Amino acid sequence: MHIGQVAARTELSLRTIRHYDEVGLVRPSARSQGGFRLYTEADVARLMVIRRMKPLGFTLDEMGELLAVTDRLDETGETPLPAAEREQLLTRLSRFEQATRERCEALRTQLSRAEEFAADLRRRAVQLTADD
């Protein structure tokens, strides 16, 4: 699919998708005769991983690291991963999972505080309106 279709599906801007290509996070799987980027479902899935990591504050380097880990774990071939390498990759994946849980909890706390603030403002507005 073309970049416009990918942008619509992932809710990422064309500029952002191009940037991820430039920094090597998600390269298009092919190019059309005219040189246009062409993406597969696997490319879209990678972009969705990035889109989900972005609001959690992961850096581009961290995103790349996670994608490299999952790529390596997902490789299917006749030769299985050596046990030590597989264990190391699973440990790194587990660290990302833990960091994600911690960042989600921090966002929940921020959201709770924001909702409390909004409720305070609402109460104040109602009170001031009633006083008039």
Image (cartoon, rainbow, N blue to C red):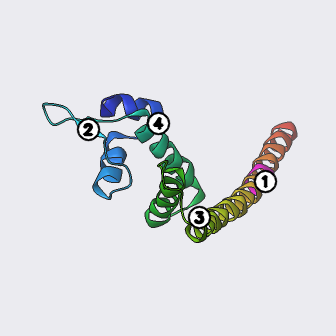
Alpha-carbon distance for marks 2 and 1?
A: 44 Å
Q: Is residue 70 magenta?
A: no
Give the residue type that dot 2 points to: Ala
Label 4 with label 3: CB-CB less than 8 Å = no
Q: Position of residue 72 (x, y in %)?
A: 49, 57
Residue 118 position (above or below residue 88): above
Q: Which residue is mark 2?
A: 30
- Other residues around mark 3 within 10 Å, as few (<14) / some (14–19) / many (≥20): some
Magenta span: 112-116
Q: CA distance from mark 4 to mark 1?
A: 27 Å
The percent position of residue 95, horizontal first and vertical second, equals 65, 67
| Residue type at the position of mark 4 | Thr
Residue contact between numbered discs 2 and 1, judged by CB atoms under 8 Å: no
- Disc with the residue nearer the chain's start (4 vs 3): 4
Of the residues under marks 2 and 4, which one precedes in the sequence? 4
Residue labelled with disc 4: 10
Q: Nearer the viewer, mark 4 or mark 3?
A: 3
Q: How many marks?
A: 4
Relative to residue 39, is residue 123 drawn left or right?
Answer: right
Q: Which residue is mark 1?
A: 112
The amino acid type of the residue labelled 3 equals Arg
Secondary structure state at the residue bearing disc 1: helix
The N terminus appears in which quarter of the rendering? top left
Distance, label 1 to label 3, CA atoms, is 39 Å
Residue 19 falls left or right of residue 49: left
Q: Which residue is found at the position 37% from the left and 28% from the top?
A: 5
* Image quadrant containing the C terminus: top right
Which numbered mark, 2 or 1, is in the foreground of this view? 2
Which label sits on residue 86? Answer: 3
